[in-house]
Each structure stands twice: as structure tokens, then as C-alpha cells.
Image (cartoon, helix red, strand yellow):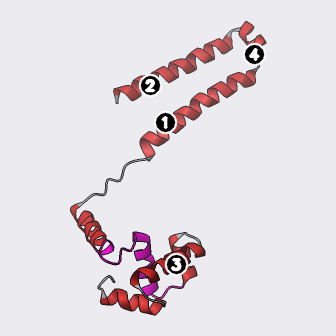
């Protein structure tokens, strides 16, 4: 926290120095006002980025025992003999719920071609040829 306060103080001191230099009439005559405005804008841009990263981008703090156990259980299921990725598992679940490829793509915010690729990978890994066979085999294997 002390480092941040010192850094902020140094940046503000630099800004004050720049503003004092702007006051001198000889310096103003040599350099245009746009340069000063751009320097001040750059300083505030840097401060904005620094504050944004510091206060709004936070690490994932939702690590409770329940979430970890669910994640471990999902990893065990995904890393068994069929070796489905997490995204393929999500697609398989949505296929079992009766969604079309386009609906799955819309819900997962990916392209239709990506869903088709995941679907074909699911078919290969589960050794099936159709969507209904994939869902049925996944239920038999107790994946779903």
C-alpha cells in the first residue's frame, strides 16, 4: 500500500511540475498548448489504467470447499476414459437438454462452426454417429 501511495504522490508531483512549467511565459511561447494538454492527458490515462487494474480486476476469490469439490468431481468425470474437455462436456449437456447447434452456439457465445467441431469431437470420443446416441451413451456411462 505504501508503494502505491508513493507512486501516486510522485505522479501528482510530476503533474504539478508540468503545470508549473506551463505557467512560464517563455516556455509557453516555445511550445504549443496542445503539447501540455497531451502530457496531462497521458498522465491521467496512466493513472486511470493503474487505478482500473488495481481496484477493478481482482483474482477469483470464490474458492469454497463446495466449489472445489464440484470442480474435482467434474475433472474426474472429464478425465476418465472418454477424455472430454470441459467445453465438450458443456455442449453434451446442452445437447441432452434438446438445444440445437445454433442455440448452443448462442448460449456459449461461440460460432456455429465451433459447436460443430465440439460435436464431432464428442462423437469421436464416445464412438457414436448421432446426437441421440451420444446422449444415450453419456447417460449409460453416467456422465450426464
Q: CA distance from mark 4 to mark 3?
A: 58 Å
- Residue drawn at x 39%, y 48% is 58
- Where is the C terminus found, in terms of image quarters? bottom left
- Residue 82 within the segment the image draws in magenta: yes
- Residue drawn at x 62%, y 30% is 42
Q: Mark 4 sits on what residue?
A: 31
**Image x and y of residue 123, in percent:** 46, 83
**Image x and y of residue 28, in percent:** 74, 13
Q: CA distance from mark 1 to mark 4?
A: 29 Å
Position above or below: 115 against 60: below
Give the mark, 3 or 2, whose residue is nearer the N terminus: 2
Give the mark, 4 or 2, whose residue is nearer the N terminus: 2
Q: CA distance from mark 3 to mark 2?
A: 47 Å
**Image x and y of residue 113, in percent:** 59, 74
Q: Mark 2 sits on what residue?
A: 7
User: Relative to the observer, which residue lies in front, 58 or 85?
Assistant: 85
Q: Mark 3 sits on what residue?
A: 104
Task: Name the side, left or right, on which 115 lies relative to 73.
Answer: right
Q: Which residues are magenta?
A: 77-100
Instruction: Assess whether mark 2 and mark 1 are in contact (beta carbons under 8 angstroms).
Output: yes
Instruction: Assess whether mark 4 and mark 1 are in contact (beta carbons under 8 angstroms).
Output: no
Position above or below: 70 against 9: below
Q: Mark 1 sits on what residue?
A: 50
Give the mark, 1 or 2, whose residue is nearer the N terminus: 2
Amino acid at each position: 500500500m505504501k508503494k502505491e501511495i508513493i507512486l501516486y504522490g510522485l505522479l501528482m508531483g510530476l503533474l504539478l511540475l508540468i503545470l508549473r512549467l506551463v505557467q512560464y511565459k517563455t516556455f509557453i511561447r516555445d511550445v504549443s498548448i496542445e503539447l501540455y494538454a497531451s502530457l496531462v492527458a497521458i498522465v491521467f490515462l496512466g493513472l486511470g489504467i493503474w487505478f482500473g487494474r488495481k481496484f477493478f480486476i481482482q483474482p477469483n476469490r470464490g474458492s469454497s470447499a463446495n466449489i472445489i469439490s464440484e470442480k474435482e468431481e467434474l475433472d474426474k468425470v472429464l478425465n476418465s476414459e472418454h477424455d472430454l474437455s470441459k467445453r465438450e462436456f458443456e455442449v453434451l449437456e446442452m445437447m441432452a437438454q434438446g438445444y440445437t447447434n445454433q442455440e448452443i452456439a448462442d448460449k456459449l457465445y461461440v460460432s456455429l462452426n465451433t459447436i460443430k467441431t465440439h460435436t464431432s469431437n464428442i462423437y469421436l470420443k464416445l464412438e457414436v454417429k448421432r446426437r441421440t446416441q451420444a446422449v444415450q451413451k453419456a447417460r449409460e456411462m453416467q456422465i450426464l
